Amino acid sequence: MTKPLKDFREDYGFKEFEIASLESDPVEQLKNWLDAAIHIPDEVEPNAMTLATVDSEGQPSARIVLLKDILDGGLVFFTNYLSSKGNELEQNAKCSVVFWWRKLHRQVRVEGTAEKVDGAYSTTYFHSRPIGNQLGAIVSPQSQVIPSREVLDQAIDALERELQPGEMPKRPEHWGGYRIIPHRFEFWQGHSNRLHDRFQYRKENGSWIIERLAP
């Protein structure tokens, strides 16, 4: 390592971020920040978010997933329902996600509960994916131990031979979408001297309350 970790720091500079600039609806505020991130050339996957779940023993785990839609105020991503995150969400639907956009010095945290989306909705999205992605989702026993990559390649080859020219594979029942229904948002804007601006939205009696938090 050429530079000690303790010496990595960045001054985020002064950026105006006040409560008056916030949307009353946090989902609309998230859409605004997502749109800004999408228009930054170096943000390759602005819809990437870290999803945190908890297993039956209380052990949290986190991984990157991709936000694919905002449906009725909920954040939608797709996965294998039999994966580690699928099993954990089956036992405990509480979860959280974090977006980080380095070029904008912005972070958004969302807490909520996850529910499976309608099967037809998952099927429509499944068939919008590249054919290789569809086949991969079918053959991969996600999160399970496998002896080698070759078993996946062989499974895809076998599946391709079964399909007729132009035939679309069927979406497996164990693959589909989740919609995270939020009850808390936090919007973080980097500021100079580590005095960052933080605003949280929390649900109270069906309405969103906006509060400034200390950095």
Image (cartoon, rainbow, N blue to C red):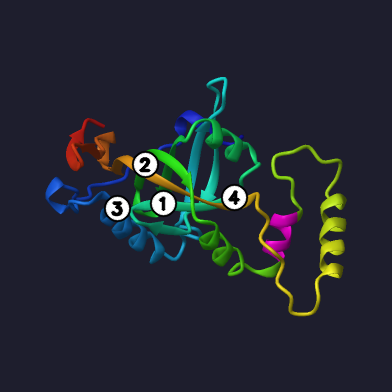
Which residue position holds label 2?
Answer: 110
Label 3, label 4: how far apart the Cα atoms are: 22 Å
Q: Amino acid at mark 1?
A: Leu
The magenta-colored residue range is 132-138
Residue 82 located left or right of residue 112: right
Identify the disc placed on residue 27: 3
Tell me if I can see residue 105 in this picture: yes
Taking the magenta stretch, the answer to whether it contains residue 136 is yes
What separation in Å lies between label 1 and label 3 (alpha carbons)?
Answer: 9 Å
Q: Is residue 189 above or below residue 84?
A: below
Question: Is 181 placed left or right of 198 in the picture?
Answer: right
Location of residue 142 (image quadrant): top right
Q: Amino acid at mark 2?
A: Val
Residue 126 quadrant: bottom right
From mark 1 to mark 2, how far is it between C-alphas? 9 Å
Q: Which comes sooner in the sequence, label 2 or label 4?
A: 4
Residue position marked by numbered label 1 in the rendering = 75
Location of the N terminus (image quadrant): top right
Mark 4 closeness class: few <14, some 14–19, many ≥20 residues within 10 Å: some
Tell me the residue that label 4 is attached to.
Answer: 79
Secondary structure mostly seen in the magenta stretch: helix
Q: Is residue 25 left or right of residue 56?
A: left
> In the rendered structure, are the residues bearing label 1 and label 2 in contact, judged by CB atoms less than 8 Å apart?
yes
Q: CA distance from mark 2 to mark 4?
A: 19 Å
Residue at image coords 86%, 41%: 147
What's the amino acid at mark 4?
Answer: Thr
User: Marks 3 and 2, how far apart in space?
Assistant: 10 Å
Mark before the other along the chain sequence, 1 or 3: 3
Q: Amino acid at mark 3?
A: Val
The residue positioned 20% from the left and 41% from the top of the image is: 206
